[in-house]
Amino acid sequence: MSAPIVSIATAENAFRQLLLKDNGVNAIVRGRVWINMAPQKKRLPYLIVTRDDAEHEHDMSGASGWVSPSISVKGLSKNVDEIQLLGEKVRMALDSQKNITVAVGAESVTLKHITLDPESAGVIPPSDGSQRGIHTFDHEYTTGHTERVPIHG
């Protein structure tokens, strides 16, 4: 038997927790919020949260203890009305949040700000010969939080 995976206090895990706790979002996805990729053949709709990149700030003495990650939230649904509603619910849950502390496993992370930058929508063409594709949205959020600083010496 393998050991259970312990969530660590990262921005992407914090975003996942925020989305799962939001009643409007969770009423649509029903717990289907994944980090990096969804398991194969999972029922739609669902969300995928990914950290795209992060800037770790430094000064003359080394790491500052501040990180600014870019977090992507992608929604997928077979229904265009549902994906539009889900995109709006995600935006309302995350955009313009400030100083929000989120428990992730035994740790927590305090997101100082969450800002929606670009957003886009699209359709993945059908692969099964049907006429129904998968409707998507992509939101890119910037955020910032403190992080542990390595001690060398």
Image (cartoon, rainbow, N blue to C red):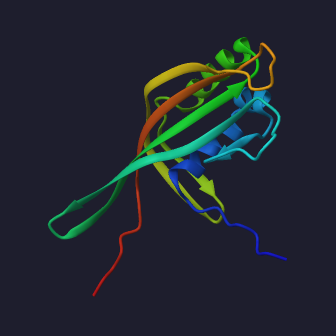
Q: Residue furthest bottom?
A: 153
**Residue 17, percent from left and from top:** 65, 46
Residue 12 is left or right of residue 112, and the answer is right
Residue 135 locus on image (x, y percent): 67, 20
Tell me which corner region of the image, top left, top right, bottom left or bottom right, holds residue 82: top right
> Looking at the image, is 90 positioned above or below residue 36?
above
User: In x, y percent, where is residue 139?
Assistant: 51, 29
State the residue in front, 114 or 120. 120
Residue at (59, 51) in percent of width and height: 13
Query: In which quadrant of the rendered view does residue 142 lie?
Result: top left
The count of marks equals 0
Q: Which of the image's four quarters has the N terminus?
A: bottom right
135 or 110: which is nearer to us?
Answer: 135
Q: Is residue 51 above or below residue 57?
A: above
Q: Residue at x 36, y 54 (%)?
A: 67
Residue at the far left: name it.
Answer: 60
Viewer-proximal residue, 95 or 99?
Answer: 95
- Based on the displayed image, in which of its 4 quarters is residue 29 positioned? top right
Q: Residue at x 33, y 79 (%)?
A: 151
Query: Front-most of 33 and 100?
Result: 33
Please give left or right for residue 80 compared with residue 102 in the image: right
The residue lying at 18 percent from left, 70 percent from top is 61
Image quadrant for the C terminus? Answer: bottom left
For residue 62, above or below residue 122: below
Residue 113 placed where, x, y %?
42, 39
